[in-house]
Amino acid sequence: MIQKRSHLKQTRRLVLKIGSSLLTNATTGVQQTMIDRIVEQVVALHRQGIEVCLVSSGSVSLGRVALAANAPCWLSRSLSVHEKQAAAAVGQPALMQAYHQTFAAAGLKVAQMLLTRDDLRHRRRYLNASNTAETLFSAGVVPIVNENDTVVVEEIKFGDNDALAALVGRVIGADLVVLATDVQGLYDANPVTTPTAQRIADVHHVDERILGMASGSGSSFGTGGMQSKVRAAEIATRAGVVLAIVGGQHDQMVTKLINGGDLGTVFYCNNDRHNRRQHWIAELLEPEGALYVDAGAEQAMLQRGASLLPIGLQRVEGDFDKGDCVAVVACGGQVIAKGLVNYNNKEMSAICGMSSEQIEQCLGFVDYTSVIHRDNLVILQRSQVKL
Ligand code: GLU
C-alpha cells in the first residue's frame, strides 16, 4: 500500500484530472501547448506500463468560445444552466478532437466516457462503466472522462470534476488520482498574497487544520478551488486511492511525482478506508428516509461494527423500499451512518423497537434478523454528514 512518496513508484493505473483553467483560454479556446504536454506525459507513462485515464474539463469554456464567434454575448455575460449545457454540447467534441488528433500523432487511441452521478448510483451502470474502462485499458486506449453536462442540472451534478476524478479513481481501480491545477499544491496560506506561505507536502489525515487551509483565504485560486480538491482527497482516500494535487504547468509532473519527487501535496489513505460497496453507498447513494436509533444501537454500530437490529429503532421516517439507502440518525440528531435496508418503511415501522425473534410474528415472515446488515452499513465521518 502507498504510505509515503517513495511508494508512489508502485502506481500501475492512475487518473489524471486537468482543469479548464489549464486547458483553455477564455478567448482563444484550446491551449494546444497544454494538450501536447499532457499527451507527452501519458505516452511516457504508457511506455513504463502505467495506464492512465484522463478526466478533462473544458467543454463549457470551449463551447463558449465557439459560440461567441457568432454572438459575443456567450463570452461577455454569465450563463444560465441551459446555456452552459448547450456550451458543453458544443465544446465537448472540440475538446475530444484536440485530444484525438494529438494522441493519434503519438500513436495512441482515445475514448470518450461521459458520466453523471446518477449513472454511478445505479450499481449496474457503475459496473458497466468499470468494465468498459477495463476493456479500454486492455485494448491500450486512453479513456477520457468528463461529466455529461447536457443531461444534469445543478442538484444532481458531481459539482466539479475534482469529485468526479476521485470517484472515477474508485470505478477504474486506480492506485493514484492526480489533480493537475494552476497552484503547486495545498498551502498553509494563500501563496499569492503571503510570500511566506508553505506548501504542505504530505497529508495522512484530513483534519480541521487541513480543512482550514483549504477553506481559508487561499481557497479562491485554481479550478473548483482548494476546498473541492481536499474534499476529493477525502473521497479518494476513503476508497483506498491516494490523491495528489500538483501544479499542471510543469513538464512530466506525474512522472516526477511517481518517482518520489518533492512536488505537490499527496494525500495518503488512512485506516477509515471503505471497500468498494461501502464507497458506493457512502459517496453516491442519496438516502430515501431515516432511521432514528437509540444509544445502545449507536454504540453497537460504532464500536463493534454490528448490524442494526429492529430493537434499536426508535422512529422511522420516509417512504422507502427494501434495498433502498437510508440515513441512520443517533439520539443527538446527527447522521452517523448510511445503509441499505432489509425492509420497506411500513414493515420497518411495524417492527420498530422489537426483538428480532418477534419479526415473524409481527410481519408474518422474516427475511432478515437485522434491518440493515453490517455489510450494507457505512459509518460516516464528519465530512460526509451533509444529508
Ligand atoms: N464538466 C465541466 C466542463 O467540461 C467542468 C467542470 C469542472 O471543471 O469542475 O467544462
Image (cartoon, rainbow, N blue to C red):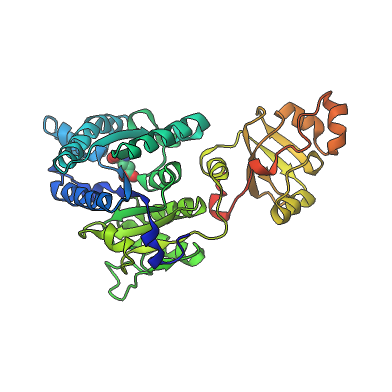
Q: Is residue 327 above or below residue 206?
A: above
Specify the quadrant of the image occupied by residue 53.
Answer: top left
214 lies left or right of 277: left
Residue 27 image point, x, y percent: 14, 43
Residue name at image x 34 percent, y 33 percent: 114
Q: Where is the C terminus found, in terms of image quarters?
A: top right
Q: Is residue 295 above or below residue 213?
A: above
Residue 97 image point, x, y percent: 18, 35
Residue name at image x 28 percent, y 54 percent: 48
Front residue of 163/190: it is 163
Front residue of 253/188: it is 253
Q: Is residue 349 above or below residue 309?
A: above
92 lies left or right of 198: left
Residue name at image x 76 percent, y 38 percent: 370
Q: Residue furthest top?
A: 364
Residue name at image x 17 percent, y 38 percent: 104
Residue 190 image point, x, y percent: 33, 66
357 lies left or right of 47: right
Viewer can see residue 157:
yes
Q: Is residue 227 above or below residue 341?
A: below
Front residue of 331/277: it is 277
Specify the quadrant of the image occupied by residue 307.
Answer: top right
Specify the quadrant of the image occupied by residue 246.
Answer: bottom left
